[in-house]
Protein backbone atom coordinates (compact mmCIF):
# COMPACT_ATOMS: atom_id res chain seq x y z
CA UNK A 1 0.00 0.00 0.00
CA UNK A 2 1.28 3.47 -0.80
CA UNK A 3 2.39 5.80 1.94
CA UNK A 4 3.41 9.39 2.41
CA UNK A 5 6.45 10.87 4.10
CA UNK A 6 6.35 14.58 4.93
CA UNK A 7 9.74 16.18 5.60
CA UNK A 8 9.45 19.25 7.79
CA UNK A 9 12.28 21.69 8.45
CA UNK A 10 11.86 24.02 11.42
CA UNK A 11 13.75 26.65 13.40
CA UNK A 12 14.67 24.01 15.98
CA UNK A 13 15.10 20.75 14.11
CA UNK A 14 13.64 18.43 11.48
CA UNK A 15 10.57 16.25 11.76
CA UNK A 16 9.45 13.35 9.61
CA UNK A 17 5.70 12.71 9.46
CA UNK A 18 4.51 9.44 7.93
CA UNK A 19 1.13 8.01 7.09
CA UNK A 20 -0.48 5.40 4.90
CA UNK A 21 -2.42 6.55 1.85
CA UNK A 22 -5.50 7.40 3.88
CA UNK A 23 -3.53 10.23 5.46
CA UNK A 24 -5.65 10.36 8.59
CA UNK A 25 -3.23 8.89 11.15
CA UNK A 26 0.32 10.12 11.37
CA UNK A 27 3.51 9.02 13.06
CA UNK A 28 5.81 11.86 14.09
CA UNK A 29 9.58 11.36 14.21
CA UNK A 30 11.88 14.03 15.57
CA UNK A 31 13.26 16.41 16.37
CA UNK A 32 16.25 15.41 14.30
CA UNK A 33 19.23 17.78 14.71
CA UNK A 34 17.44 19.28 17.71
CA UNK A 35 18.08 22.94 18.28
CA UNK A 36 19.50 23.59 14.79
CA UNK A 37 17.74 25.49 12.04
CA UNK A 38 16.71 23.15 9.24
CA UNK A 39 16.04 25.34 6.26
CA UNK A 40 15.22 22.46 3.93
CA UNK A 41 15.28 18.73 3.50
CA UNK A 42 14.35 16.76 0.44
CA UNK A 43 14.42 13.20 -0.89
CA UNK A 44 15.89 11.91 -4.12
CA UNK A 45 13.31 11.09 -6.81
CA UNK A 46 15.67 8.34 -7.97
CA UNK A 47 16.01 6.73 -4.52
CA UNK A 48 13.38 7.82 -2.00
CA UNK A 49 15.44 6.56 0.92
CA UNK A 50 18.20 9.04 0.07
CA UNK A 51 17.47 12.30 1.87
CA UNK A 52 19.49 15.48 2.20
CA UNK A 53 19.07 18.09 4.92
CA UNK A 54 20.45 21.59 5.35
CA UNK A 55 21.31 22.11 9.01
CA UNK A 56 22.61 25.48 10.15
CA UNK A 57 23.22 27.64 13.16
CA UNK A 58 24.25 31.21 13.81
CA UNK A 59 26.98 29.83 16.07
CA UNK A 60 28.27 26.82 14.18
CA UNK A 61 27.53 27.56 10.53
CA UNK A 62 26.43 25.10 7.87
CA UNK A 63 26.19 21.33 8.06
CA UNK A 64 24.73 19.05 5.39
CA UNK A 65 23.22 15.78 6.59
CA UNK A 66 22.44 12.73 4.48
CA UNK A 67 20.24 9.75 5.17
CA UNK A 68 20.32 6.50 3.21
CA UNK A 69 17.38 4.91 5.02
CA UNK A 70 14.52 7.33 4.63
CA UNK A 71 15.42 9.48 7.61
CA UNK A 72 15.89 6.82 10.28
CA UNK A 73 19.60 7.56 10.55
CA UNK A 74 21.69 10.48 9.33
CA UNK A 75 25.36 11.32 8.89
CA UNK A 76 27.04 14.64 8.16
CA UNK A 77 28.63 15.00 4.73
CA UNK A 78 30.58 17.88 3.21
CA UNK A 79 29.95 21.45 4.30
CA UNK A 80 32.66 23.36 2.44
CA UNK A 81 30.85 25.79 0.14
CA UNK A 82 33.58 27.89 -1.46
CA UNK A 83 32.69 30.38 -4.16
CA UNK A 84 34.53 29.81 -7.39
CA UNK A 85 37.56 32.07 -7.81
CA UNK A 86 37.42 35.59 -6.46
CA UNK A 87 33.76 35.93 -5.51
CA UNK A 88 33.44 39.62 -6.37
CA UNK A 89 30.74 41.89 -5.07
CA UNK A 90 27.02 42.59 -5.24
CA UNK A 91 24.81 45.53 -4.35
CA UNK A 92 24.50 46.24 -0.64
CA UNK A 93 21.68 47.94 1.25
CA UNK A 94 23.49 51.27 1.26
CA UNK A 95 24.18 51.24 -2.49
CA UNK A 96 27.81 50.21 -2.15
CA UNK A 97 29.26 46.98 -3.47
CA UNK A 98 29.60 44.17 -0.90
CA UNK A 99 31.64 40.96 -1.16
CA UNK A 100 29.87 37.64 -1.52
CA UNK A 101 29.86 35.80 1.84
CA UNK A 102 28.52 32.30 2.33
CA UNK A 103 25.89 32.13 5.08
CA UNK A 104 23.71 29.05 4.66
CA UNK A 105 21.97 26.66 2.28
CA UNK A 106 18.30 27.46 1.75
CA UNK A 107 17.36 24.71 -0.68
CA UNK A 108 18.59 21.25 -1.62
CA UNK A 109 17.37 19.78 -4.90
CA UNK A 110 18.38 16.18 -5.61
CA UNK A 111 18.82 15.15 -9.25
CA UNK A 112 15.84 13.51 -10.92
CA UNK A 113 17.97 10.53 -11.97
CA UNK A 114 21.07 10.19 -9.76
CA UNK A 115 20.80 9.96 -5.96
CA UNK A 116 24.41 11.14 -5.57
CA UNK A 117 23.86 14.36 -7.51
CA UNK A 118 22.27 17.21 -5.60
CA UNK A 119 22.08 20.98 -6.05
CA UNK A 120 22.30 23.48 -3.19
CA UNK A 121 20.95 27.02 -3.27
CA UNK A 122 22.97 29.29 -1.02
CA UNK A 123 22.87 32.67 0.69
CA UNK A 124 24.69 34.80 -0.49
CA UNK A 125 23.07 33.71 -3.71
CA UNK A 126 24.90 31.00 -5.60
CA UNK A 127 24.24 27.51 -6.90
CA UNK A 128 26.41 24.57 -5.88
CA UNK A 129 26.40 20.99 -7.11
CA UNK A 130 27.64 17.78 -5.57
CA UNK A 131 28.01 14.61 -7.59
CA UNK A 132 29.33 12.46 -4.74
CA UNK A 133 26.38 12.36 -2.40
CA UNK A 134 27.14 15.69 -0.76
CA UNK A 135 30.76 14.99 0.19
CA UNK A 136 32.13 17.81 -1.97
CA UNK A 137 30.48 20.85 -3.51
CA UNK A 138 31.39 22.89 -6.57
CA UNK A 139 29.85 26.21 -7.47
CA UNK A 140 28.24 26.79 -10.88
CA UNK A 141 29.71 30.29 -11.18
CA UNK A 142 28.03 31.16 -14.45
CA UNK A 143 24.93 32.06 -12.49
CA UNK A 144 26.63 34.93 -10.69
CA UNK A 145 27.77 36.09 -14.09
CA UNK A 146 24.16 36.90 -14.94
CA UNK A 147 24.40 40.48 -13.68
CA UNK A 148 25.31 39.36 -10.16
CA UNK A 149 26.87 42.71 -9.40
CA UNK A 150 23.35 44.19 -9.58
CA UNK A 151 21.70 41.69 -7.22
CA UNK A 152 20.91 42.83 -3.72
CA UNK A 153 19.61 41.16 -0.56
CA UNK A 154 15.98 41.31 0.43
CA UNK A 155 14.98 41.50 4.08
CA UNK A 156 15.55 37.77 4.44
CA UNK A 157 19.01 37.86 2.89
CA UNK A 158 20.22 37.35 -0.66
CA UNK A 159 19.14 33.75 -0.91
CA UNK A 160 18.82 31.27 -3.73
CA UNK A 161 15.68 29.55 -2.46
CA UNK A 162 14.12 27.75 -5.44
CA UNK A 163 15.63 25.19 -7.81
CA UNK A 164 13.51 23.49 -10.47
CA UNK A 165 14.95 20.78 -12.72
CA UNK A 166 13.24 20.35 -16.08
CA UNK A 167 12.17 16.68 -16.37
CA UNK A 168 12.05 16.88 -20.17
CA UNK A 169 15.46 18.48 -20.66
CA UNK A 170 18.39 17.62 -18.37
CA UNK A 171 20.25 20.74 -19.48
CA UNK A 172 17.52 23.13 -18.38
CA UNK A 173 17.10 24.43 -14.83
CA UNK A 174 15.31 27.34 -13.26
CA UNK A 175 16.32 29.04 -10.05
CA UNK A 176 15.02 32.04 -8.11
CA UNK A 177 16.78 34.50 -5.86
CA UNK A 178 15.52 37.17 -3.47
CA UNK A 179 15.98 39.91 -4.50
CA UNK A 180 17.36 39.26 -7.97
CA UNK A 181 14.65 37.32 -9.80
CA UNK A 182 14.32 34.14 -11.84
CA UNK A 183 17.12 32.70 -13.96
CA UNK A 184 17.37 29.86 -16.48
CA UNK A 185 20.14 27.73 -17.85
CA UNK A 186 19.86 25.68 -21.04
CA UNK A 187 23.33 24.15 -20.89
CA UNK A 188 23.37 22.26 -17.61
CA UNK A 189 24.33 25.23 -15.49
CA UNK A 190 27.29 26.63 -17.43
CA UNK A 191 25.58 29.83 -18.46
CA UNK A 192 22.50 31.56 -17.15
CA UNK A 193 20.29 34.46 -18.05
CA UNK A 194 17.58 36.38 -16.22
CA UNK A 195 14.03 35.39 -17.19
CA UNK A 196 12.08 38.24 -15.64
CA UNK A 197 10.43 39.96 -18.60
CA UNK A 198 6.85 40.89 -17.72
CA UNK A 199 7.52 41.23 -13.99
CA UNK A 200 6.76 44.67 -12.60
CA UNK A 201 7.87 45.66 -9.12
CA UNK A 202 6.33 49.10 -8.82
CA UNK A 203 6.80 49.44 -5.08
CA UNK A 204 10.18 47.74 -4.76
CA UNK A 205 12.24 48.98 -7.71
CA UNK A 206 12.89 52.42 -9.18
CA UNK A 207 12.69 50.81 -12.61
CA UNK A 208 9.64 48.50 -12.23
CA UNK A 209 10.34 46.23 -15.27
CA UNK A 210 14.10 45.93 -14.56
CA UNK A 211 15.91 42.90 -15.93
CA UNK A 212 17.07 41.85 -12.43
CA UNK A 213 16.18 42.92 -8.90
CA UNK A 214 12.71 41.41 -8.56
CA UNK A 215 11.87 39.72 -5.29
CA UNK A 216 10.67 36.35 -6.54
CA UNK A 217 9.38 34.31 -3.59
CA UNK A 218 8.88 30.93 -5.25
CA UNK A 219 8.33 29.11 -8.54
CA UNK A 220 6.34 25.99 -9.39
CA UNK A 221 6.06 23.71 -12.43
CA UNK A 222 4.05 20.61 -13.30
CA UNK A 223 6.36 17.90 -14.61
CA UNK A 224 4.05 17.10 -17.52
CA UNK A 225 4.22 20.67 -18.79
CA UNK A 226 7.68 22.03 -18.05
CA UNK A 227 7.30 25.14 -20.21
CA UNK A 228 4.60 26.51 -17.94
CA UNK A 229 5.83 28.17 -14.77
CA UNK A 230 3.94 29.77 -11.93
CA UNK A 231 5.46 32.37 -9.65
CA UNK A 232 4.58 33.94 -6.33
CA UNK A 233 6.41 37.23 -6.44
CA UNK A 234 6.72 39.58 -3.47
CA UNK A 235 3.49 41.11 -4.78
CA UNK A 236 1.74 39.47 -7.78
CA UNK A 237 1.08 35.89 -8.77
CA UNK A 238 2.53 35.37 -12.25
CA UNK A 239 2.48 32.78 -15.03
CA UNK A 240 4.76 32.09 -17.96
CA UNK A 241 3.80 29.81 -20.86
CA UNK A 242 7.21 29.90 -22.53
CA UNK A 243 9.70 28.78 -19.88
CA UNK A 244 10.07 32.21 -18.38
CA UNK A 245 10.56 34.24 -21.55
CA UNK A 246 7.52 36.35 -20.69
CA UNK A 247 5.38 36.51 -17.57
CA UNK A 248 1.83 37.75 -17.13
CA UNK A 249 -0.10 38.37 -13.96
CA UNK A 250 -2.76 35.87 -12.84
CA UNK A 251 -3.59 37.32 -9.41
CA UNK A 252 -7.23 37.75 -10.45
CA UNK A 253 -9.63 37.85 -7.49
CA UNK A 254 -7.14 37.00 -4.72
CA UNK A 255 -7.74 39.04 -1.54
CA UNK A 256 -4.01 39.82 -1.54
CA UNK A 257 -1.45 38.80 -4.11
CA UNK A 258 1.40 39.01 -1.61
CA UNK A 259 2.57 35.63 -0.36
CA UNK A 260 5.42 33.17 -0.28
CA UNK A 261 4.78 29.61 -1.55
CA UNK A 262 3.06 28.42 -4.72
CA UNK A 263 2.32 24.81 -5.67
CA UNK A 264 0.80 22.85 -8.54
CA UNK A 265 -1.61 19.93 -8.16
CA UNK A 266 0.06 16.56 -8.86
CA UNK A 267 -2.37 15.52 -11.61
CA UNK A 268 -4.00 18.73 -12.83
CA UNK A 269 -1.39 21.07 -14.37
CA UNK A 270 -3.78 24.02 -14.28
CA UNK A 271 -4.72 23.62 -10.61
CA UNK A 272 -2.49 25.81 -8.47
CA UNK A 273 -2.38 26.88 -4.85
CA UNK A 274 -1.24 30.03 -3.05
CA UNK A 275 -1.65 31.30 0.51
CA UNK A 276 -2.35 35.04 0.48
CA UNK A 277 -0.62 37.15 3.11
CA UNK A 278 -1.86 40.61 3.97
CA UNK A 279 1.16 42.62 2.89
CA UNK A 280 4.92 42.96 2.96
CA UNK A 281 4.50 45.00 6.13
CA UNK A 282 2.11 42.58 7.85
CA UNK A 283 3.17 38.99 7.32
CA UNK A 284 -0.05 37.21 8.30
CA UNK A 285 -3.27 36.19 6.55
CA UNK A 286 -5.82 38.90 5.67
CA UNK A 287 -8.54 39.32 8.32
CA UNK A 288 -6.92 36.72 10.59
CA UNK A 289 -8.31 33.94 8.35
CA UNK A 290 -5.93 31.24 7.16
CA UNK A 291 -7.09 30.51 3.63
CA UNK A 292 -5.47 28.54 0.86
CA UNK A 293 -6.58 29.78 -2.54
CA UNK A 294 -6.96 27.34 -5.40
CA UNK A 295 -7.26 28.12 -9.07
CA UNK A 296 -8.42 25.35 -11.41
CA UNK A 297 -7.86 27.57 -14.43
CA UNK A 298 -4.13 28.17 -14.15
CA UNK A 299 -4.69 31.49 -12.39
CA UNK A 300 -6.99 34.52 -12.44
CA UNK A 301 -10.01 32.70 -10.99
CA UNK A 302 -9.43 31.71 -7.40
CA UNK A 303 -11.54 30.03 -4.70
CA UNK A 304 -10.88 30.15 -0.96
CA UNK A 305 -10.29 26.82 0.76
CA UNK A 306 -11.18 27.17 4.42
CA UNK A 307 -12.69 23.90 5.64
CA UNK A 308 -10.61 22.87 8.67
CA UNK A 309 -8.41 25.96 8.71
CA UNK A 310 -8.69 28.65 11.43
CA UNK A 311 -11.01 31.43 10.28
CA UNK A 312 -10.47 33.88 13.10
CA UNK A 313 -7.54 35.29 15.09
CA UNK A 314 -4.91 33.54 12.97
CA UNK A 315 -1.69 35.52 12.51
CA UNK A 316 0.85 32.98 11.30
CA UNK A 317 2.88 33.14 8.12
CA UNK A 318 3.63 30.40 5.60
CA UNK A 319 7.16 30.61 4.25
CA UNK A 320 8.28 30.09 0.65
CA UNK A 321 9.46 26.47 0.89
CA UNK A 322 6.66 25.39 3.22
CA UNK A 323 4.01 24.02 0.83
CA UNK A 324 4.09 20.79 -1.17
CA UNK A 325 1.85 18.15 -2.74
CA UNK A 326 1.88 14.36 -2.81
CA UNK A 327 1.09 12.33 -5.92
CA UNK A 328 -1.48 9.87 -4.64
CA UNK A 329 -4.61 9.50 -6.79
CA UNK A 330 -6.42 11.98 -4.59
CA UNK A 331 -3.75 14.66 -4.46
CA UNK A 332 -2.61 15.66 -0.99
CA UNK A 333 -1.62 19.25 -0.23
CA UNK A 334 0.50 20.22 2.78
CA UNK A 335 1.79 23.39 4.34
CA UNK A 336 3.52 24.45 7.52
CA UNK A 337 3.22 27.71 9.43
CA UNK A 338 5.45 29.92 11.50
CA UNK A 339 3.17 28.96 14.40
CA UNK A 340 4.33 25.36 14.15
CA UNK A 341 1.25 23.79 12.59
CA UNK A 342 1.50 21.43 9.63
CA UNK A 343 -1.82 21.19 7.82
CA UNK A 344 -2.74 18.45 5.37
CA UNK A 345 -5.52 17.97 2.89
CA UNK A 346 -6.05 14.53 1.33
CA UNK A 347 -8.64 15.83 -1.15
CA UNK A 348 -6.86 18.50 -3.19
CA UNK A 349 -7.58 21.19 -0.62
CA UNK A 350 -11.32 20.72 -0.06
CA UNK A 351 -10.83 19.83 3.61
CA UNK A 352 -7.90 20.33 5.95
CA UNK A 353 -6.70 19.02 9.28
CA UNK A 354 -3.52 19.63 11.27
CA UNK A 355 -1.02 16.78 11.40
CA UNK A 356 0.79 18.54 14.25
CA UNK A 357 0.04 21.84 15.97
CA UNK A 358 3.01 22.77 18.12
CA UNK A 359 6.26 22.33 16.25
CA UNK A 360 8.84 25.13 16.14
CA UNK A 361 8.29 27.64 13.34
CA UNK A 362 8.15 25.72 10.07
CA UNK A 363 10.69 26.70 7.42
CA UNK A 364 10.06 24.03 4.81
CA UNK A 365 7.72 21.19 3.87
CA UNK A 366 8.45 18.53 1.26
CA UNK A 367 6.47 15.39 0.53
CA UNK A 368 7.49 11.98 -0.72
CA UNK A 369 4.91 9.55 -2.10
CA UNK A 370 6.20 6.04 -1.49
CA UNK A 371 5.05 2.88 -3.30
CA UNK B 1 46.92 14.34 26.00
CA UNK B 2 44.89 17.48 25.46
CA UNK B 3 41.38 17.50 26.93
CA UNK B 4 38.83 19.55 24.97
CA UNK B 5 35.31 20.38 26.13
CA UNK B 6 32.86 20.97 23.29
CA UNK B 7 29.57 22.88 23.35
CA UNK B 8 26.38 20.80 23.32
CA UNK B 9 25.58 21.10 19.63
CA UNK B 10 29.06 20.10 18.52
CA UNK B 11 28.99 17.10 20.86
CA UNK B 12 25.83 15.85 19.18
CA UNK B 13 27.25 16.56 15.73
CA UNK B 14 30.48 14.66 16.49
CA UNK B 15 28.61 12.05 18.58
CA UNK B 16 30.94 12.42 21.54
CA UNK B 17 30.58 13.13 25.24
CA UNK B 18 31.31 16.39 26.99
CA UNK B 19 35.07 15.97 26.76
CA UNK B 20 37.33 14.59 24.02
CA UNK B 21 41.00 13.73 24.24
CA UNK B 22 43.44 14.65 21.51
CA UNK B 23 47.03 13.76 20.74
CA UNK B 24 48.75 16.86 19.37
CA UNK B 25 51.97 16.49 17.40
CA UNK B 26 54.59 19.24 17.85
CA UNK B 27 53.96 22.48 19.74
CA UNK B 28 50.61 22.73 21.49
CA UNK B 29 49.15 25.90 20.10
CA UNK B 30 45.64 27.15 19.60
CA UNK B 31 45.89 26.26 15.91
CA UNK B 32 47.44 22.81 16.39
CA UNK B 33 44.76 21.82 18.89
CA UNK B 34 42.00 22.85 16.47
CA UNK B 35 43.80 21.05 13.63
CA UNK B 36 43.97 17.87 15.71
CA UNK B 37 40.32 18.21 16.72
CA UNK B 38 39.19 18.59 13.10
CA UNK B 39 41.42 15.71 11.97
CA UNK B 40 39.87 13.39 14.56
CA UNK B 41 36.33 14.68 13.99
CA UNK B 42 36.09 15.88 10.35
CA UNK B 43 32.40 16.77 10.74
CA UNK B 44 33.52 19.69 12.93
CA UNK B 45 35.35 21.37 10.05
CA UNK B 46 33.71 24.70 9.32
CA UNK B 47 31.73 24.77 12.56
CA UNK B 48 34.46 26.36 14.71
CA UNK B 49 36.62 28.06 12.07
CA UNK B 50 35.65 29.30 8.64
CA UNK B 51 36.58 26.80 5.93
CA UNK B 52 38.34 29.34 3.76
CA UNK B 53 39.80 31.96 6.10
CA UNK B 54 40.38 29.66 9.10
CA UNK B 55 39.13 32.55 11.25
CA UNK B 56 37.19 31.71 14.42
CA UNK B 57 33.46 31.91 13.80
CA UNK B 58 32.07 35.06 15.45
CA UNK B 59 30.00 33.34 18.16
CA UNK B 60 32.66 30.83 19.21
CA UNK B 61 34.94 31.44 22.17
CA UNK B 62 38.05 29.61 23.44
CA UNK B 63 38.65 29.48 27.21
CA UNK B 64 41.53 27.89 29.13
CA UNK B 65 42.77 28.26 32.71
CA UNK B 66 40.35 31.08 33.41
CA UNK B 67 41.56 33.12 30.44
CA UNK B 68 39.85 34.06 27.16
CA UNK B 69 41.99 32.79 24.26
CA UNK B 70 39.48 33.76 21.59
CA UNK B 71 41.51 36.65 20.23
CA UNK B 72 44.90 34.96 20.32
CA UNK B 73 46.68 34.10 17.06
CA UNK B 74 46.76 30.46 15.89
CA UNK B 75 50.42 30.08 16.88
CA UNK B 76 49.78 31.12 20.49
CA UNK B 77 51.12 28.43 22.84
CA UNK B 78 48.54 27.08 25.27
CA UNK B 79 49.30 26.93 29.03
CA UNK B 80 51.28 24.00 30.42
CA UNK B 81 48.25 22.91 32.43
CA UNK B 82 46.36 22.36 29.15
CA UNK B 83 49.36 20.67 27.54
CA UNK B 84 49.64 18.18 30.41
CA UNK B 85 45.91 17.59 30.54
CA UNK B 86 45.56 18.98 34.07
CA UNK B 87 43.15 21.63 32.73
CA UNK B 88 40.68 21.46 29.87
CA UNK B 89 40.55 23.63 26.74
CA UNK B 90 36.98 24.87 26.35
CA UNK B 91 35.24 25.65 23.07
CA UNK B 92 32.17 27.66 23.91
CA UNK B 93 29.13 28.90 22.03
CA UNK B 94 28.80 32.56 22.99
CA UNK B 95 25.81 33.66 25.01
CA UNK B 96 22.92 35.06 23.02
CA UNK B 97 19.44 35.95 24.04
CA UNK B 98 16.19 34.71 22.53
Image: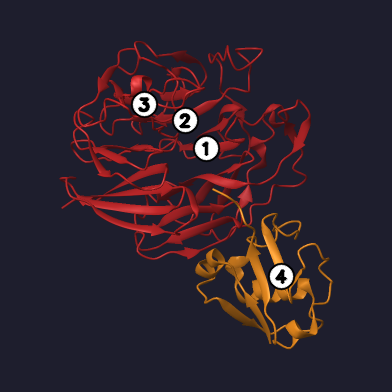
- Residue under label 4: B63
Check disc 3 and report its element: helix, strand or loop.
loop
The answer to whether residue A234 is above or below residue A87 is above
Q: Is residue A327 visible?
A: yes
Residue for badge 1:
A161
Letter of the chain that mark 3 sits on in the rendering: A
Closer to us: A233 or A255: A255
The chain holding disc 4 is: B
Q: Earlier in the sequence, mark 1 or mark 2?
A: 1
Chain B colour is orange
What is chain A's hue in the picture?
red
According to the image, label 3 marks what residue?
Answer: A275
Mark 1 → mark 2, Cα distance in angstroms: 7 Å
Q: Are marks 1 and 3 in contact (CB under 8 Å)?
A: no
Q: Is residue A221 left or right of residue A22?
A: right
Crowd band around label 2 with a 10 angstrom C-alpha radius: few (<14), some (14–19), many (20+): many
Circles 1 and 2: CB distance less than 8 Å?
yes
Q: Which element is circle 2 on?
A: strand
Q: Position of residue B38 (x, y in %)?
A: 65, 71
Indicate left or right for A182 with A269 as reference.
Answer: right
Q: Give the alpha-carbon distance from disc 4 to disc 2, as whole Å.
A: 44 Å
Residue at x-position 71% and y-position 28%? A93
Say if residue A371 shows up in the picture: no
Q: Chain of mark 2?
A: A
Amino acid sequence: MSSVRVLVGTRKGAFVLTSDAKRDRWDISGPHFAGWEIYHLKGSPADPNRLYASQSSGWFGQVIQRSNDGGKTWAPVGNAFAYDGVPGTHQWYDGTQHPWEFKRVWHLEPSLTDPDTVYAGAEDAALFRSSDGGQTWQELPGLRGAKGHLWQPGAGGMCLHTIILDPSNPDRMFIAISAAGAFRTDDGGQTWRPVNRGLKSEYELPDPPAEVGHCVHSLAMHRSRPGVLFMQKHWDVMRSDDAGELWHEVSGNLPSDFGFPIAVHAHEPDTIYVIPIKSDSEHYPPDGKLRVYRSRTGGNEWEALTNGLPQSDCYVNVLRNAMAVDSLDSCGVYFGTTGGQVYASADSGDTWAPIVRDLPAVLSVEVQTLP
Amino acid sequence: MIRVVLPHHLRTLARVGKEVELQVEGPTTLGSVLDALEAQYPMLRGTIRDHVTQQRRPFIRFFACGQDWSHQPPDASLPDAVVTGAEVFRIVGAMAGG
